[in-house]
Image (cartoon, rainbow, N blue to C red):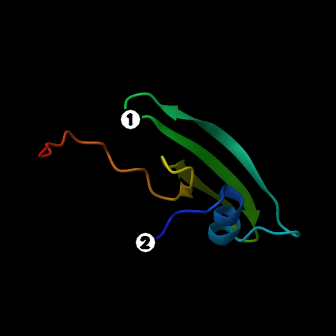
C-alpha cells in the first residue's frame, strides 16, 4: 500500500467525509514516548452522530490510519 504523499487533510476528508459543508476539528494530539509515534484525533459531526478517528504520522512524513511499524533489531551482512 502506498502511503507517501498523503496529507492529514486528505485523509480526514476521505475517512470522515468532511468538506465545505461539514467541518472537522482536532480534539487531541501528541506523541507516544515509548514508540515515537505522533498522533492526532479528529472529530466531526454527522447526522447519525459524532465521528472521531486517530491518525498517525509515519517517518516519511505521511499520515495514516494505522500506526507505524515497530522498529526491531536487525542483523545485516557487511
C-beta proximity under 8 Å, tags 2 and 1: no
Quarter of the picture containing the N terminus is bottom left
Q: Is residue 36 above or below residue 45?
A: above
Query: Which is more toward the observer, 4 or 26?
Result: 4
| Quadrant placement of the C terminus | top left
Q: Residue under circle 1?
A: 35
Question: Residue 14 lies in what quarter of the image?
Answer: bottom right
Q: Secondary structure at mark 1?
A: loop
- Most extreme residue toward the top is 33
Question: Which residue does the image show at 69% across and 53% down from the upper left?
Answer: 43
Q: Position of residue 67 (x, y in %)?
A: 43, 51
Residue 18 has which mark?
Answer: none
**Mark 1 nearby-residue class (10 Å; few <14, some 14–19, many ≥20):** few
The Cα–Cα distance between marks 2 and 1, rounded to whole angstroms, is 22 Å
Q: Is residue 14 left or right of residue 35?
A: right
Tell me the residue that label 2 is attached to: 1
Label 2: how many residues lie within 10 Å, few (<14), some (14-19) or many (20+)? few
Residue at screen point 71% across, 46% down: 26
Q: Secondary structure at mark 2?
A: loop
Amino acid at each position: 500500500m502506498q502511503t507517501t504523499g498523503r496529507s492529514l487533510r486528505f485523509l480526514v476528508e476521505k475517512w470522515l467525509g468532511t468538506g465545505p459543508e461539514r467541518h472537522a476539528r482536532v480534539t487531541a494530539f501528541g506523541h507516544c514516548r515509548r514508540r515515537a509515534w505522533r498522533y492526532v484525533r479528529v472529530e466531526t459531526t454527522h447526522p447519525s452522530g459524532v465521528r472521531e478517528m486517530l491518525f498517525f504520522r509515519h517517518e516519511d512524513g505521511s499520515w495514516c490510519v494505522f500506526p507505524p511499524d515497530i522498529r526491531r533489531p536487525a542483523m545485516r551482512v557487511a
